[in-house]
Image (cartoon, rainbow, N blue to C red):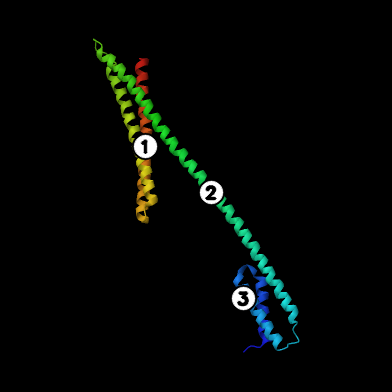
Amino acid sequence: MMDARKLLINLLYRASAQSSEMSGWGHRQTKNLLRDLRAALDQAQERKLTALNVSALRNYLDDWERGEAENQRVSATVYQQQIEEWKARLTADTAHSIEMFKAVLEAGQTALKTAIVINGGAAAALLATLADVIRSQSPNQLLAPLGQSWLLFMIGLGSAGVATAFRYLSQATYAASMYAEVEAKKSKYYRGGDWLRNLAVLTGLSSYVLFFCGAIAVAKMIVR
């Protein structure tokens, strides 16, 4: 068995290695090393090795252990502060994302409501004009262009309604993807939500395009 002197030398070598590579050591490794060093000192003291100043070494180990405990306390405090900062950033980012998501939903809803109002109002106004033209005794050359413009407004109105339905279905599909337990099913729901969202955007834009086409057609009739 290795004698106390050799054991102590080896343990001191490990201690010097720890001092040069402190970042690679954990708290448990340090405690184990301190325990082994104290055991070696006990053996040296029992064998009365006069070449070693056992008392000084014990004081050194005590100071080292107290320093290690203080480092652990400081590290725990720093980690706790980092966790609190991370939680605060996560809370702020989550709140910001939720508000941005609400703003996007509200903007989309407002755009669709606007498309419904402008197309519906234009169609209602043209319908009254068409009724007057139809009730007139003599044929009117404005009847066909007015009818075409009214049809454009009505299709635009229907497109806005369809876009609203696609918008609701896309949100429902996204919500279903959040509660899906199977990853493949979750991905399928998410892709479906993307498709429905794109359809809602396209039909909503077509509603505005149809409104402008109808308005241009009416303007041409008035200019003539």
Residue 31 visible, this orientation: yes
Tell me how far mark 3 sits from mark 1, CA to CA.
Answer: 68 Å
Residue occupying the point 67% across, 65% down: 70
Task: Where is residue 82? Give x, y as percent.
Answer: 60, 56
Q: From the viewer's perspective, is the residue at label 1 or at label 2 nearer?
A: 2
Quarter holding residue 7: bottom right
Question: Does residue 150 sit above or below 30 in this rendering?
Answer: above
Task: Where is residue 75? Give x, y as percent.
Answer: 63, 62
Q: Are marks 1 and 2 in contact (CB under 8 Å)?
A: no
Quarter holding residue 195: top left
Residue occupying the point 70% across, 74% down: 62
Residue occupying the point 49% across, 41% down: 99
SS of the residue under disc 3: helix
Left of 128 or right of it: where is 87?
A: right
Label 2: how many residues lie within 10 Å, few (<14), some (14-19) or many (20+)? Answer: few
Can you say which quadrant of the picture contains the N terminus? bottom right
Given the image, on which type of amino acid does mark 2 rest?
Thr
Question: Does residue 63 sit above or below 99 in this rendering?
Answer: below
**Can you identify the residue that label 2 sits on?**
91
Can you say which quadrant of the picture contains the C terminus? top left
Label 1: how many residues lie within 10 Å, few (<14), some (14-19) or many (20+)? Answer: some
Quarter holding residue 28: bottom right
Given the image, on which type of amino acid does mark 1 rest?
Leu
SS of the residue under disc 2: helix
Task: Where is residue 12? Give x, y as percent.
Answer: 68, 79
